[in-house]
Amino acid sequence: MSITPPRDEASVAVRQRLYVDAKRAAVWGLGVNFFLVLSKLAGGIATGSAALIADAVNSIGDVASSMAVRGALSMAQVEEDEDHPYGHTKAESIAGLSVSLLVAFSAGLLGLETIKRFGGDLEVPSSAAGVIAGACAVIKEIIYRYTMRVAKRLDSSSLTAVAWDHRSDAIGSGLIAVSLIAAPYVGDWGQYIDPVAALCLCVALIYTGGKIFLSTAAELMDQQADAETLQQIREIAESVGGVRAVEKLRARKSGLEYFIEIHVQVEGLMTVDAGHRIAHHVKDELLVSLPRVRDVHVHIEPFSCSYEPAAEQ
């Protein structure tokens, strides 16, 4: 049993605030994407723009992604149970991985459908489609900046994935806008601008999906925490009375939170009871000082010991 309460009220409030902010960013993304689906789809049908319709289909995937991330953040907050002794924090990382796969897969399908269009009759869409795409690009860039700011502050893999999805959409819509507005002024080449712009968007989405997949997969494989976080953990542990040094430190990120395994060295002739108390002080100090730490496992190692076992007779 811990000598001190594992967390104070301020620490608990900070931890809960992490999820509140993350959920708010996911909900904002959901609302914006739903609005853009309707706008792009209506504009694409009205103007006959394949690129705008492709962008609308991509936004449908964004709606699904935002819903998945919102649900995963709620699941990640669920406390430990008998089947999940480490909690459910990886649900947030799984959502990020799912978003990356959805982005890449949907972009691949859209690319194949766009390539098929080159075998038929191509038309130059109305320049109004470019205006709609431009407005969508501006909106997407705004929601990207907001989501990425929250993602960096919380170090959230799922929100980072969603944010980069917003950025790729903003770039794609911007390219589509420029292409469609310029199409009527480039003669016979104008009919190819729309499908080529759609293909460029698909390539960008596949690249983004792959990049997000690799970073999130590393997190799911329990990659070591960043150097700054490790140094902070080490300094807190070494500040506890009785701790002579930190021998080994492992910290893995799980969703928005961290699990720590730390080996601290104490005087070798110290009693088991005294060493046990120091271990709990280390754990309690880390939990209180770092609200994003979900749990800490402390192992005691001897720093020095003058005791020599008697030789066998």
Image: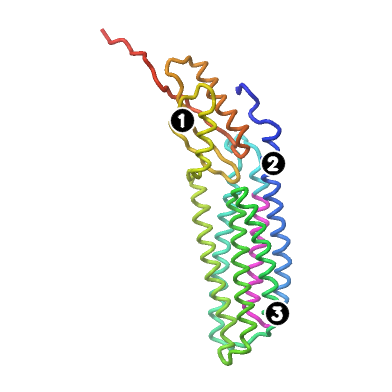
Q: CA distance from mark 3 to mark 2?
A: 44 Å
Q: Position of residue 13 (x, y in %)?
A: 70, 38
The residue singled out by tag 2 in the image is: 16
Amino acid marked by disc 2? Gln
Extreme residue toward the left, this view:
313
Q: Nearer the viewer, mark 2 or mark 1?
A: 1
Q: Position of residue 220 (x, y in %)?
A: 52, 48
Q: CA distance from mark 3 to mark 1?
A: 64 Å
Q: Residue at x 54, y 69 (%)?
A: 204
Q: CA distance from mark 2 to mark 1?
A: 30 Å
> From the viewer's perspective, is 68 left or right of 234?
right
**Residues in magenta?**
44-72
**Secondary structure under the numbered disc 2 in the rendered image:** helix
From the image, give the main secondary structure of the stretch colored magenta. Answer: helix
The residue singled out by tag 1 in the image is: 246
**Secondary structure under the numbered disc 1 in the rendered image:** strand
Q: Is residue 26 magenta?
A: no
Tell me the quadrant of the picture where the N terminus can be found.
top right
| Between 1 and 118, the one nearer to me in the picture | 1
The residue singled out by tag 3 in the image is: 45
Question: Mark 2 packing: few (<14 Cα in 10 Å), some, or many (20+)?
Answer: some
Instruction: Name which of mark 3 and mark 1 comes first in the sequence.
Output: 3
Q: Position of residue 114 (x, y in %)?
A: 56, 78
Amino acid marked by disc 1? Val
